[in-house]
């Protein structure tokens, strides 16, 4: 190597070293100078930050309070939405563009995000249903073999017969042997043409996934696991009245299946708010954000801001209860280990709390610092810019109509928020005051 080449190589090495040093220094200065909060925030999106494609004015002001002049977050923040017909990167870009801030992919949690934990289904042939890039969504979550409603419709055109104008002119003898046996169903969100999806999903369930055989063995037992994301019955768009959401489609599917078969549809998993699994995973993401921002994943309180008492508030309060039960169990176990008394058999409630702690630990690997840190409290904040509106006056003390699937047990107390405010800007002011925090 010539002297000139050596000089250039040395120059490149020094430039790389200097850039790395500057990056490390800027990160050190940021961590040292930032007033690291002892809390994190989970934002719902529809009805809290936006109404359809329109930004709620208070949301723009609110997000300015937790970001710096470069659009970087100064408070650990995760956006938790029940939307599921898109990819996290697209939702992150949408939020970044709408509010002129830097929302990272890891700060976005969609209803289907926890599915990457359900590894027992990743190598099975899975039917995915919803709108948008459903195969790409499934690939990103770890699923390796997927088919869609459109794949079934194209292979078996005689199965979709509701639309008279779309019926085949002639009966087709399809090549059926090449179509794979479906081993699980994943419902990402409300599909287009509900009647088509309802018909073909029932066909898959009744044939136990072997739709090419036409053998209606599903009347005997349901052997196909069904994993459903987003239980919202309705959502708030830019229309003044709420619109049907995926929960309404699930309600239709459940009703049709029970009417045809004579027994309830079984779910292997229900994800999205108010599912407790959603909050397990949201806490994990929030701790990772705290670690990036302050160098350590230490948060005492999780604030969940939402507009739906039966989803955002119910789920946050359910999580608060689980936190309290887990804390009580840990205290009891410490007391027992320091006592010479005989260790008692675990009760049903303590077993549930222990399972809760195991799940929380399961979201982190053994070499991650976040493995040893969890929030101690969850606080629910209800805003009046979405599903819940004070005009006409709504009274949360009156009996509610339960809008979630039959698998989620309704407890009216869990739909009562810790705080009701006008909008998300007021919500943040209340949180800052409660935490005695200022940026």
Image (tube, rainbow, N blue to C red):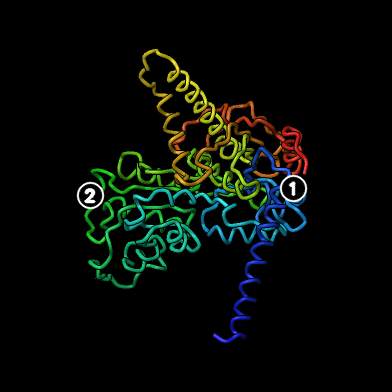
In the displayed structure, does residue 437 sit left or right of residue 409? right
Q: Depth check: 221 or 417 in front?
A: 417
Residue 78 makes an appearance in the image: yes
Which residue bears the numbered disc 1? 33
**Residue 217: assigned label:** 2
Q: Depth check: 245 or 307 in front?
A: 307
Residue 157 x, y percent position in the rendering: 33, 67
Q: Depth check: 183 or 162 in front?
A: 183
Q: Measuring 28% from the left and 70% from the top, which residue is drawn there?
A: 171
Q: Measuring 56% from the left and 34% from the top, which residue is drawn there?
A: 314
Q: Secondary structure at mark 1?
A: helix
Q: Give the mark count.
A: 2
Q: Secondary structure at mark 2?
A: helix
Q: Is residue 428 above or below residue 317?
A: below
How crowded is the residue under tag 1: few (<14 C-alpha within 10 Å), some, or many (20+)?
Answer: few
Query: Within the image, what quadrant is residue 168 found in?
Result: bottom left
Residue 185 x, y percent position in the rendering: 37, 52
């Amino acid at each position: 190597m010539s002297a000139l080449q050596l000089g250039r190589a040395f120059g490149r090495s020094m430039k790389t070293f200097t850039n790395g040093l500057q990056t490390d220094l800027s990160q050190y200065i940021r961590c040292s100078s930032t007033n690291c909060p002892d809390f994190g925030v989970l934002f719902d999106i529809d009805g809290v930050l936006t109404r359809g494609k329109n930004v709620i004015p208070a949301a723009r002001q609110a997000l300015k309070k937790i970001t710096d002049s470069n659009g970087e977050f100064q408070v650990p923040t995760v956006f938790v939405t029940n939307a599921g017909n898109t990819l996290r990167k697209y939702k992150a870009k949408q939020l970044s563009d709408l509010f002129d801030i830097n929302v990272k992919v890891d700060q976005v949690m969609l209803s289907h995000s926890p599915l990457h934990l359900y590894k027992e289904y990743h190598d099975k042939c899975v039917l995915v249903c919803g709108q948008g890039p459903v195969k790409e969504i499934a690939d990103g979550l770890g699923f390796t073999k997927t088919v869609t409603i459109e794949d079934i419709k194209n292979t078996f055109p005689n199965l979709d017969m509701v639309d008279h104008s779309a019926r085949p002119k002639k009966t087709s003898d399809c090549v059926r042997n090449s179509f794979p046996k479906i081993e699980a169903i994943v419902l990402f969100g409300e599909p287009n043409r509900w009647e088509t999806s309802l018909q073909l999903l029932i066909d898959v369930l009744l044939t136990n996934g072997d739709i090419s055989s036409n053998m209606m063995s599903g009347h005997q037992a349901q052997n196909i696991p069904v994993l459903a994301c987003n239980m919202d019955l309705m959502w708030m768009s830019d229309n003044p009245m709420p619109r049907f959401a995926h929960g309404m489609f699930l309600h239709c599917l459940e009703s049709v299946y029970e009417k045809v078969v004579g027994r309830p549809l079984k779910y292997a998993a229900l994800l999205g708010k108010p599912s407790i699994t959603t909050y397990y995973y949201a806490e994990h993401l929030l701790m990772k954000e705290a670690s990036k921002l302050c160098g350590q994943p230490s948060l005492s309180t999780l604030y969940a801001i939402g507009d739906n008492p039966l989803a955002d508030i119910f789920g946050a309060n359910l999580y608060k209860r689980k936190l309290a039960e887990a804390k009580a169990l840990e205290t009891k176990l410490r007391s027992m280990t320091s006592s010479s008394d005989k260790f008692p058999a675990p009760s049903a409630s303590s077993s549930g709390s222990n399972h809760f702690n195991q799940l929380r630990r399961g979201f982190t690997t053994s070499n991650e610092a976040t493995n040893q840190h969890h929030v101690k409290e969850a606080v629910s904040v209800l805003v009046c810019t979405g599903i819940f509106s004070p005009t006409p006056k709504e009274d949360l003390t009156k009996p509610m109509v339960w809008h979630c699937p039959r698998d989620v047990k309704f407890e009216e107390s869990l739909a009562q928020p810790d705080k009701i405010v006008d909008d998300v800007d007021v919500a943040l002011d209340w949180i800052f005051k409660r935490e005695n925090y200022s940026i």
